[in-house]
Amino acid sequence: MPKFFKFPILLLVIACLHASPAWADLGFPDYLKLPPQIVLNTDQALQVENVAEAEFVVDAAGTSKLFKGKRFARWMTYKPAAGEPALGYYNGSEARIYTAMQATLSKSGWQTVRADDNKARWTMRYQAGGKQAWAEVKMDAPQAQVWVELIESADAGAAFSVPKPGKQPEKFGVKDDIPYLLPWPGSKRIGEGRGDGPMDVAEPGKSQEAQLVGQAVETRNYQGPTTLSKLQFIGEYREALIKNGWTVIFPASAAAVRDYGMLVAHYTQDGRDIWARLNYEFTASLTISTTDVGKTDLGSAFAKDCHVPLYGVFFDFNKATLKPESDSVLGKVASLLKTDASIKAEVEGHTDNVGGDDYNLKLSDARAASVRNWLVQHGIDAARLTSIGYGKSRPVADNSTDIGRARNRRVELAKLGCRP
């Protein structure tokens, strides 16, 4: 080739390269291409969750459908191309952004399945090369802000699992992970604690008052992977516990997992009595707590103090109806009384300071009677037991806090003739 042709050809190649779209790395899968006018908003980070859900409108009738899979989402900025009018109100800005994005997305294989009349929001579908995905775009065009949320169908992967509690209580230090409630893979421990006192296992948003169980709580705090969603953590941990024989109090079903950032479970196999509470907060801040009720020596406490609070005895709100979760604690009380037939005891009912004196006295008396009846029905001679309600007259904690009131709402077992 003559030398005088080489230089113009080189210029032509460079010109072609500059004419190609300058795709920004927006963090989405490579099959979602956006036009060069879509640029990063440095104030808005990409959201990526390995297992998540998103609800999109999928037809002109407004039908919504819930999709589950790997989720990507981000707010970005639309920067008008050279010569393009500035964005603003009532000047077709939404339609211009829509047209620019559609020109690129359609070439990548995306199909629009519905769009608002003003093109400010639309849903699209991708299916090619073994990939299936849905995405929604919505915008605040006058502010040049564009939101893209994508759900990609993905294989479930390996099931999460944790060890099953042993037949004997595990020995572990405060700096150790809880053996039967291990952290999510890839999590980093950021705190731990061990404290005296019961654990609150009330259902968030549904229980009108705190519900306490146990006498000592182990707590571990972790920072989970940024890709860990509430749906994955609560859902897969729930299935792992059920597989190991735990009874999950809530979420009560797999479908209810999306409504919770908290899980409470109870383990009663092999003579164990363990409660677990797991919390997921924004950005995968994880808390795992447990109280081993079976390790509490009711007999020693009863012999030493002549009375013992029975945290873990639950009633329906403002009623004297015992909940099934109470059986494990009451079973231990029955065993204690059966070991020494000479013990005569009083079942005491106590309340917090909410409500009138007469109401609280009647409620506490009825709850104490319910516990006494349960014990009699489970083999304790009725002549050995009395019951009485003290209402709000004997608080053991500050009634100005939820936990304090919960500690005051209790049933106690007292040895007759021993406690002053």
Image (cartoon, rainbow, N blue to C red):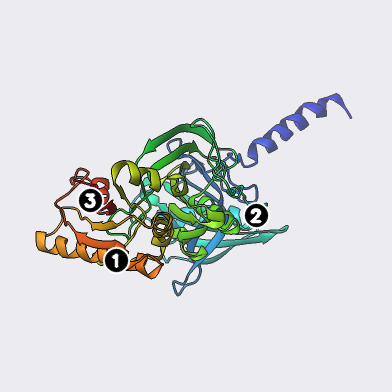
Q: Is residue 150 visible?
A: no
Q: Quadrant of residue 11?
A: top right
Residue lying at 49% horizontally and 65% vertically, measured from the top left: 253
Q: Position of residue 173 (x, y in %)?
A: 51, 32
Name which of mark 2 and mark 1 comes first in the sequence.
2
Q: Is residue 32 visible?
A: yes
Say if mark 2 contacts mark 1, CB within 8 Å. no
* Real-space Cα separation, disc 3 to disc 1, in angstroms: 15 Å
Per the rendering, the mark at residue 417 is 3
Element on which disc 3 rests: loop
221 vs 201: above or below: above
Element on which disc 2 rests: helix
Q: Nearer the viewer, mark 2 or mark 3?
A: 3
Say if mark 2 contacts mark 3, CB within 8 Å. no
* Real-space Cα separation, disc 2 to disc 3, in angstroms: 84 Å
Q: Amino acid at mark 2?
A: Ser
Say which of 137 and 292 sits in front.
Answer: 292
* Real-space Cα separation, disc 2 to disc 1, in angstroms: 81 Å
Question: Pointer 2: residues within 10 angstroms few (<14), some, or many (20+)?
Answer: some
Question: Pointer 3: residues within 10 angstroms few (<14), some, or many (20+)?
Answer: few
Say which of 109 and 215 sits in front.
Answer: 215
Residue lying at 30% horizontally and 62% vertically, measured from the top left: 384
Q: Amino acid at mark 3?
A: Gly
Query: Number of callouts in the render?
Result: 3
Residue lying at 19% horizontally and 53% vertically, measured from the top left: 352
Name which of mark 2 and mark 3 comes first in the sequence.
2
Question: Pointer 1: residues within 10 angstroms few (<14), some, or many (20+)?
Answer: few
Q: If the image is split into quadrants, where does the N terminus sit?
A: top right
- The residue where tag 2 is placed is 108
- The residue where tag 1 is placed is 383
Q: Quadrant of residue 304?
A: top left
Q: Amino acid at mark 1?
A: Ala
